[in-house]
Image (cartoon, grey):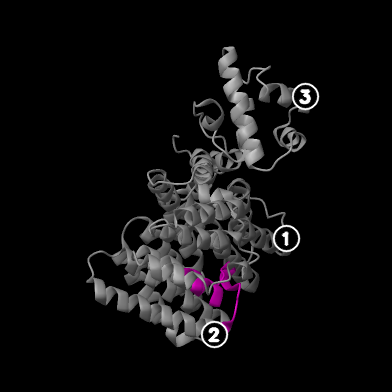
Amino acid sequence: MDEEQARKIGERLRSARRQRGMSLRKLAERADVSVSYLSMVENGHRHLDRSSLITALAEALHIAPSELNGQPFAPSDPNASAAHEAIPALRLALMGITMAAPPDRRPPQVPATVLAELVAQANRLYHAAEYGTLAADLPSLLASLHAAVEAADGAARLELLRLLADAYHPACTLLLKNLGYTDLAFIAVTRAAEAITELEDPVYSALSGFFHTHVLMSAGSPTQALAQATAAANALQGHLHSPDAHALLGELHLISATSLTQDRHRAGNARKEEIRGHLAEAADLAERTGETRAWHLNFGPANVGIHRVSLNTDLGLHGEAVTAGRAVHPEVLEDAPGRQAAYHADLARSLAHLRGREADAVSSLLTAEQIAPQRIRASAPVRTTVEYLTDRPLPAYVARDLRGLAHRIGLPN
């Protein structure tokens, strides 16, 4: 690197820092470098030629490395990488676990009360979009649950079977779906169905249908997904004896509506009317249940509103999606940052297609990423939206933010 290059990088660094309103000391702290070193770089007296330092400074400024030296580096997201690195162990767990325990299996050492808390924690990690931690924890949790089930009988076994289903749904199934491992998500719902069969509980059977619907959609079969959700909802109708059952029926209406948005074989107007019908049913049920955490999900008025935004976005009704978004308060779901982030991401997808709202779209994407970075960086629709926005005319400061996001989700700059 020659003196002219060093000077240009220093100028770019200073410009980016000032645009962020960040002091030398604050940037030095975030990038873990000395203030004196940073000052010399900005003044062109030190060469910034190590990719690790360039990346550290770019990430501290929330921009792409190419903003500093014009040459992109591979994105570095250790949390997202951790989730994918944990998949081989989880795959082996899913392939190796069966409902029949080996004869030499020792009695479980983990009390049922502890297992219940671990299952709850796994689901909290999913909703917090802490995918790396969750993926690493799931193999041992599933193994412990299966061991506990096989060592128990009577009412204790039934309770453990419910815990096992709760671990597979949604902690395992939706994690794998969101990370793109649809085949493993199918194995997870199949394992859960094995446990649920023994329960002989029609409500849990409907729950199994709900998660199968998610996997079928992820696999690209919306027609089968809708058929699965419809069958589950019909079976549940005769067993609406609790608020949790009503919440599950509401979730089935929402997933049915989502399946319909993906079914291109249905006539447009008829499809929209069916979607509106499912949304209306879900909204009525949400008024009855209020905000719930039934089945480790988040059914209630807020989630219905979030779906209203996403469904209109998927239908290409971008103006209606943005209008619907004004009535949504995703912060109500304080224990589910993943759902909050999904709202902002879907809103951004619609804003990106409205003339003059591109900067708002980028702002919404950045808000979504700040709330749940692992979920947003793993999202295919977000990736598509970022690619679309990179070809749009944007103010310089917005384009800089967008390039930073593109870098973090693995798109070339």
Few, some or many C-alpha atoms within 10 Å of disc 2 (few <14, some 14-19, many ≥20)? few
Residue at 48% over, 78% down? 250
Residue at which label 1 appears: 114
Q: Residue 413: x and y, percent?
A: 45, 34
Q: CA distance from mark 1 to mark 3?
A: 51 Å
Which mark identifies residue 36? 3
Q: Nearer the viewer, mark 2 or mark 1?
A: 2
Q: How many marks?
A: 3
Residue at 73% over, 31% down? 32
Q: CA distance from mark 2 to mark 1?
A: 34 Å
Residue at which label 2 appears: 287
Q: Residue 299: x and y, percent?
A: 54, 74
Residue at 61% over, 63% down? 336
Q: CA distance from mark 2 to mark 3?
A: 59 Å
Name which residue type carries label 2: Glu
Q: Earlier in the sequence, mark 2 or mark 3?
A: 3
**Magenta-drawn segment:** 288-307
Helix, strand or loop at label 3? It is helix
Left or right for 183, reference 29: left
Quarter location, residue 351: bottom left
> Taking the image as drawn, is residue 101 in sight?
no
Helix, strand or loop at label 2? It is helix
